[in-house]
Image (cartoon, rainbow, N blue to C red):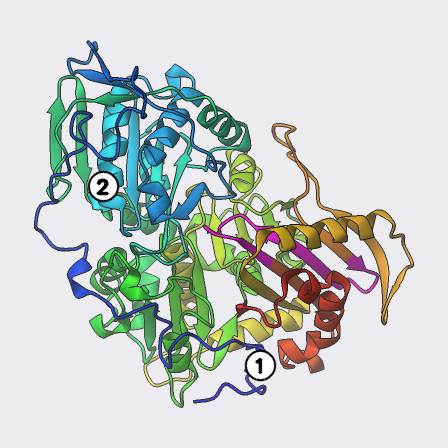
């Protein structure tokens, strides 16, 4: 079924690149044996210093491990090592190819550098959480992290069964258990498997990603590291719930769903959502063989009464079924096709590798992430019990469209524009200034935790649809996703928005393009003409945190025009190889008679201008984007 230009705000097939297969985009044939939900014990990995191929003394005739006594009653091996290049974190931790992390001491160096960057009171005899999205190498990595944590004096590790904990669930567990922080083993929406991506990041005691002040210290310590502290303990069987002790150090294997589900039940009216699913309302959730497969059945089926066949790709796999676990129109094509077929389901959603991103679809209708957060914010007080007292404030990342700004203005709420990266929202939440926020990169969330939350966004939308249909009886026509969005546009106007991603560009060319744009804005002035557009200002976005005064500079090159249109250029920090160039294009349209136009057609003059101004083809050699949203 072809997706035509008449389908409201779905990008035109002229511009949307085809996925790598005629169905869901895949990387190679799936391997069912990689399921993470089996009950068999994990293989015991030889990670002790004397045997390990992963943590061992750096090659030197004078280097050998030293064993020291430890107050916790376990032996600690001090393993000599040497700095390894390339361990600077991006916006969401350290991400590289699996083979890079499998290099001798690569992961171990970074973990030790993290402990060397923290104050002792941040972890000594404390509790840390450990979990991840189940991708390839997580099992081995979990054992390495546990042993280094014990070696550095951590008192207890809470780890999800089979190493599984979604990113939002890690934040929820940290907050509920009052842990000192936690490790998240994930490369988010990037592909998994031996030839693909792996990642690691650290979240602090309120559940938020570590700030740049800490990630900068980690990087600095990776440049001077000389030894790794490794506890001489056995591998932990992560397949069985319960506590295992090694001296005064302990590991508790926990249910990955329970704490997170309990929190969601306190945020939403599950009975209201359940009543919607009992009507003639067809729901579909694509877990993309990623971590939310472990959460979908307990939440949507067992608690809310959805049909079991409403969950697709619901078994987490180490390689995500050889797919690309990014919930967008390209990589979740199967779901898009189902929602756009004749008499398709009423509601569709997908989540990514680690469960923090989301895509929302109605029947033959795509909700842009920028519109999604604005609509959730506009309806939250009525539809979601957690917000009955009203949101404290709203915020978006700088590249996200201005749709949320208009909601904040109408509701007279404090509003913040921050750089890309959830850690910037966390400070505002901790200070009581922010309740609901989002990023155009399919991330939406609230202050119930300190991470974006894919399942939260799905439940928020189900709550809004359920509230709008609360008085409907079986057989009556329901208020649809598209009805809710179009009513919102009629009230607030429509911000046409699109993002062009050029993945794995050659880094030198991408950086030269950004340098060229920075030179261009340095000589620009108000009133300059760019085709039919008149420049209001151009800058490289700088953010001063209103809570702690920290400054984040060079966060994206912006061209803002007098009619409110914007073009923004950024290099993404979430890839594992090369550079991802992202171009954001936005235009505000208050005229309701024009709201049904196709986004790509409405934005075409601005898109052409964005490509021309940047000289993207000249610098990167790219003819077409990898993904358009």
Residue sitting nearer the eye, 358 or 559: 559
Residue sitting nearer the eye, 455 or 600: 600
Tell me whether the residue at label 2 lies in contact with that at label 1, contact meaning CB atoms closer than 8 angstroms.
no
Q: Quadrant of the C terminus?
A: bottom right
Q: Is 276 inside the magenta-drawn segment?
A: no
Q: Quadrant of the N terminus?
A: bottom left
Q: Could one spot residue 426 in this view of the protein?
A: yes
Q: Callout 2 environment at 10 Å: few (<14), some (14 to 19), or many (20+)?
A: some
- Element carrying mark 2: helix
Quarter of the figure with residue 617: bottom right
Q: Position of residue 250 (x, y in %)?
A: 17, 25
Q: Which residue is mark 1?
A: 12
Quarter of the figure with residue 11: bottom right
The alpha-carbon separation of the residues under discs 2 and 1 comes to 43 Å
Quarter of the figure with residue 228: top left
Left or right, 598 with reference to 423: right
Q: Which residue is mark 2?
A: 140
Q: Position of residue 190 (x, y in %)?
A: 41, 56
Residue 103, above or below 605: above
Left or right, 624 with reference to 462: right
Observer-side mark, 2 or 1, equals 2
Q: Callout 1 environment at 10 Å: few (<14), some (14 to 19), or many (20+)?
A: some
Tell me the magenta residue range: 560-581
Left or right, 102 with reference to 615: left
Q: Is 570 inside the magenta-drawn segment?
A: yes
Residue 497, above or below 264: below
Q: Position of residue 384 (x, y in %)?
A: 44, 55
- Element carrying mark 1: loop
């Amino acid at each position: 079924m072809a997706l035509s230009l008449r389908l409201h705000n779905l990008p035109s097939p002229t511009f949307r690149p085809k996925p790598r297969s005629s169905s869901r985009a895949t990387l190679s044939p799936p391997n069912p044996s990689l399921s993470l939900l089996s009950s068999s014990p994990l293989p015991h990995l030889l990670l002790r210093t004397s045997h390990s191929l992963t943590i061992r003394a750096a090659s030197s005739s004078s280097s050998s491990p030293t064993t020291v006594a430890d107050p916790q009653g376990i032996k600690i091996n001090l393993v000599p090592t040497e700095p390894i290049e390339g361990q600077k974190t991006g916006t969401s931790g350290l991400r590289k190819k699996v083979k890079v992390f499998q290099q001798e001491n690569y992961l171990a160096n970074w973990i030790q550098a993290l402990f060397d960057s923290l104050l002792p009171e941040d972890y000594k005899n404390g509790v840390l959480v450990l979990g991840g999205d189940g991708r390839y190498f997580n099992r081995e990595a979990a054992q390495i992290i546990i042993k280094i944590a014990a070696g550095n004096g951590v008192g207890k590790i809470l780890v999800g069964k089979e190493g599984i904990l979604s990113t939002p669930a890690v934040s929820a567990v940290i907050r509920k258990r009052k842990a000192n922080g936690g490790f998240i083993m994930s490369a988010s929406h990037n592909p998994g498997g031996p030839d693909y991506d792996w990642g690691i990041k650290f979240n602090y005691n309120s559940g938020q990603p570590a700030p740049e002040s800490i990630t900068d210290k980690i990087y600095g310590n990776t440049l001077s590291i000389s030894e790794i502290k490794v506890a001489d303990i056995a591998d932990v069987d992560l397949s069985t719930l319960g506590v295992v002790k090694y001296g005064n150090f302990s590991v508790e294997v926990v249910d990955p769903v329970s704490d997170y589900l309990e929190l969601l039940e306190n945020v939403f009216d599950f009975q209201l959502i359940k009543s919607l699913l009992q009507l003639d309302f067809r729901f579909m959730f694509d877990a993309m063989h990623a971590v939310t497969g472990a959460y979908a059945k307990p939440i949507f089926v067992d608690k809310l009464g959805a049909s079991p066949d409403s969950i697709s790709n619901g078994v987490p796999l180490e390689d995500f079924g050889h797919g690309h676990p990014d919930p967008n129109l390209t990589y979740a094509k199967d779901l898009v096709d189902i929602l756009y077929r004749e008499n398709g389901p009423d509601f569709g959603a997908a989540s990514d590798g680690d469960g923090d991103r989301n895509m929302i679809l109605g029947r033959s209708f795509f909700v842009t992430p920028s519109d999604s957060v604005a609509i959730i914010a506009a309806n939250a007080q009525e539809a979601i019990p957690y917000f009955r007292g009203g949101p404290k404030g709203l915020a978006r990342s700088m590249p996200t469209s201005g749709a949320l700004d208009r909601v904040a203005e109408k509701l007279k709420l404090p509003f913040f524009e921050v750089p890309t990266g959830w850690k910037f929202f966390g400070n505002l939440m901790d200070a009581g200034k922010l309740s609901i926020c989002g990023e155009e990169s399919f991330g939406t969330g609230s202050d119930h935790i300190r991470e974006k939350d894919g399942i939260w966004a799905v439940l928020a939308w189900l709550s809004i649809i359920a509230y709008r249909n609360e008085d409907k009886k079986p057989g009556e026509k329901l208020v649809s996703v598209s009805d809710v969005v179009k009513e919102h546009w009629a009230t607030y106007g429509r911000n046409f928005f699109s993002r062009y991603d050029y993945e794995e560009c050659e880094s030198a060319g991408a950086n030269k393009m950004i340098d060229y744009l920075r030179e261009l804005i340095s000589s620009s002035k108000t009133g300059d003409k760019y085709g039919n557009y008149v420049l209001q200002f151009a800058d490289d976005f700088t953010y001063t945190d209103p809570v702690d005064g920290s400054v984040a500079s060079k966060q994206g090159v912006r061209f803002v025009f007098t009619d409110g249109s914007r073009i923004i250029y950024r290099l993404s920090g979430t890839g594992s190889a090369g550079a991802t160039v992202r171009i954001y294009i936005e235009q505000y349209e208050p005229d309701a008679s024009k709201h049904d136009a196709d986004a790509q057609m409405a934005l075409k003059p601005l898109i052409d201008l964005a490509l021309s101004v940047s000289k993207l083809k000249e610098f990167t050699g790219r003819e077409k984007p990898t993904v358009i949203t």
